[in-house]
Image: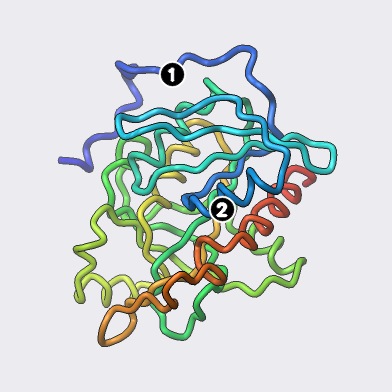
Amino acid sequence: MITDSYDDKSPAKINVKKNENAIQAAAVIYTFSHEIEKYVTENYHCEKIGEFKMAGGAHSAYVFSYNGKKYGFFKTWVGAPACVAPIEELTAVMETNKLIHFGGAGCLDKEIARGKVMIPTEAYRDEGTSYHYAPASDYIRIKNWKTVRDFMAENQIPFVLGKTWTTDAFYRETVSNFEKHKADGCISVEMEGSAVQAVCDFRGYEVYMFFTGGDLLDAPVWTMRKEKGQIKHTQHDPGHFDIALALAEYVVNL
């Protein structure tokens, strides 16, 4: 069974070769949006230092300087296995121990406004990747949620706390499963959170995570809750990168 997949007693068959001359980054920020990647590369003096490659193409890895420190940035892939891959491969490109993970998430509570910052406290493991990095359990604790909460509060950024439901199968977010997870305290649904926390715990990274409230499941009919071409208050909103960068600076200076 998949819940029996965790093995910390034998070595992996495939391993990443660490770059001993990798650039040191104070923190690395990543997200899923091509619009945000465009914003970052056009508004910060980014230096491309490598690529993460898959059969479908490559994503560039960058570093840039901000207030005297170097930060890394890359656009990642959607879905737990694909999102975890560049985290595993990070040491081949740059060196850090702090990651900022942000992106869009479906909303399980109609009272949470579109574009609202959501901070996950635990993630329900309805995906397969995390079971290879952590012993089986229903939830994995999002280790640094209190730090993210404190940052948002100190900077007067409105936020909401709650559990998240991480699933591989967004076309199988059924009515019964939605009702079950909402009743259990989940406020969001996304595809990577539990796996990212598991791999970061396993590899020794500190990850700081927040989501942008997007499409709504808590309605008679699923709705995207945005206008055609809308950027503001969506996961493509560059303002959320500004939040992520400020959070990166905050955790680096703790």
Q: What residue is drawn where x is 29% and y is 34%?
A: 6
Q: Nearer the viewer, residue 114 or 188?
A: 114
Image quadrant containing the N terminus? top left
In the depicted structure, whether residue 23 falls above or below residue 201: above
The numbered mark, 1 or 2, whose residue comes first in the sequence reads 1
Check disc 1 and report its element: helix, strand or loop. Answer: loop
- Estimate the x, y position of residue 65 in percent, counting from the top left: 76, 37
Q: Is residue 241 left or right of residue 154?
A: left
Where residue 98 sits, quadrant-wise, is: top right
Q: Amino acid at mark 2?
A: Ile
Q: What residue is drawn where x is 31% and y is 70%?
A: 181
Residue with the most extreme right position: 68
Q: Disc 1 vs disc 2: Cβ atoms closer than 8 Å? A: no
Q: Is residue 104 left or right of residue 176?
A: right
Where residue 44 sits, quadrant-wise, is: top right
Q: Which residue is mark 2?
A: 36
Q: Amino acid at mark 1?
A: Val
Q: Which residue is mark 1?
A: 16
